[in-house]
Amino acid sequence: MQLIVSKKIFILLIFILLFSSCKRIDSGVNPENSAPASIVDLYGQIHVKGNKIVDKNEKPVALHGMSLFWSQWGGNYYNEKCVQWLRDDWKCTVVRASMGIESGGYLTNTQTEYAKTIAVIDACIKYGIYVVVDWHDHNAQDHLSQAKAFFANIAQKYGSQPNIIYEIYNEPLQVSWSNVIKPYAVEVIKSIRQYDPDNLIVVGNPNWSQDVDVAAKDPINDANVAYSLHFYTGTHKQWLRDKAISAMNSGAALFVSEYGISEASGNGNIDLAETNLWMNFLDTYSLSSCNWSIIDKSETSAALKTGANPNGGWTAADLTQSGTYNKNYIITKNLDAFGKLDSSAK
Ligand code: MG
């Protein structure tokens, strides 16, 4: 009799164990903790607070990841598997889709370039990381109507997703902030805000997004605007960090949507000492960064060697000096954040 009861209890225990393990697999979430499932769950709706970008808990947040190359020339890397690899292997918390506008880009191949951008946005949402939707243009004031229509569409389609960061003008040239770029930005921001009241908008400024101090003195009247600061460590030195400090002292929040450890041309030498000064600067001010770029072109700033698989899966031998440096940087900066996620989501 005793033996039979023990058997029954044993069988019951087996059933309980089986049931609980099935439940765990089904839900994909460990019931013993409430850890966030993704980076975007962890940080939520990022936004501007004073001269900082903060997470849903009002804590300063710095995203670190990779920029893709101009979509019309690097479009084979605009796919879901590449984004998944950048999250899983490089620990990117953000990927930038640099939709080329001129030179065979969106103006002339509208549907093709749009589809590439959408593929990256959808992948970033699927894998729970942030995506910078970049109007990669040097003359955007000449393409105002197209920019307004594009960003209105993106805002309507994706504005409820905290993943989206709008970058409405990559790098203006030597044109006036107050008379040319700011009026363009105000119009594009209006077209976004009719659908999306709260996501972060990053705005370029004169001289390839170096004149953040000029923009900060005549800021845009919107609660969630940051100004893009672009630098290439082989060319831009303390004088540009000083301009950035001046902008932050004026109250502006900055977002490094593009940087390279090459010279400003994207080619030339790598100055590791200056690069380390810049990376310390990013740490000191909690600035987000996207490295230029995921491409297998033969130039210093390209992260990949010629022929690297468009779908990721890259080994150390596939990475250039820049790719190796920046992958290590991104992993170092983001490992803690990924460590806070539910283990089934990593
Ligand atoms: Mg929104």
Image (tube, rainbow, N blue to C red):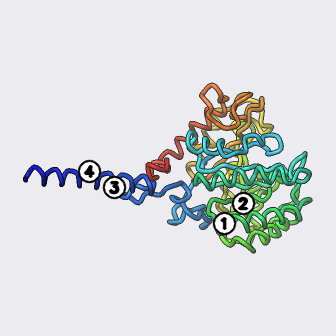
Where residue 74 sits in the image (x, y, percent)? 78, 40
Near-viewer residue (191 or 203) = 191
Pair 4/1: label in front:
4
Badge number at residue 279? none
Badge number at residue 20? 3
Badge number at residue 166? 2
- Quadrant of res 34: bottom left
Q: Which residue is mark 4?
A: 14
Q: Which residue is mark 1?
A: 199
Extreme residue in the left direction: 1
Left or right: residue 46 versus residue 116 is left
Q: Amino acid at mark 3?
A: Ser
Q: Amino acid at mark 4?
A: Ile
Q: Are marks 2 and 1 in contact (CB under 8 Å)?
A: yes
Q: Amino acid at mark 1?
A: Asn
How many neighbours does mark 2 have within 10 angstroms: few (below 14), some (14-19), or many (20 or more)? many
Where residue 143 sits in the image (x, y, percent)? 90, 59
How many neighbours does mark 4 have within 10 angstroms: few (below 14), some (14-19), or many (20 or more)? few
Q: Is residue 10 visible?
A: yes
Q: Earlier in the sequence, mark 2 or mark 3?
A: 3
Q: Are marks 4 and 1 in contact (CB under 8 Å)?
A: no
Q: Earlier in the sequence, mark 1 or mark 3?
A: 3
How far apart marks 2 and 1 lie (CA) works out to 8 Å
- Secondary structure beneath dot 2 equals strand
Where residue 228 sits in the image (x, y, percent)? 72, 55
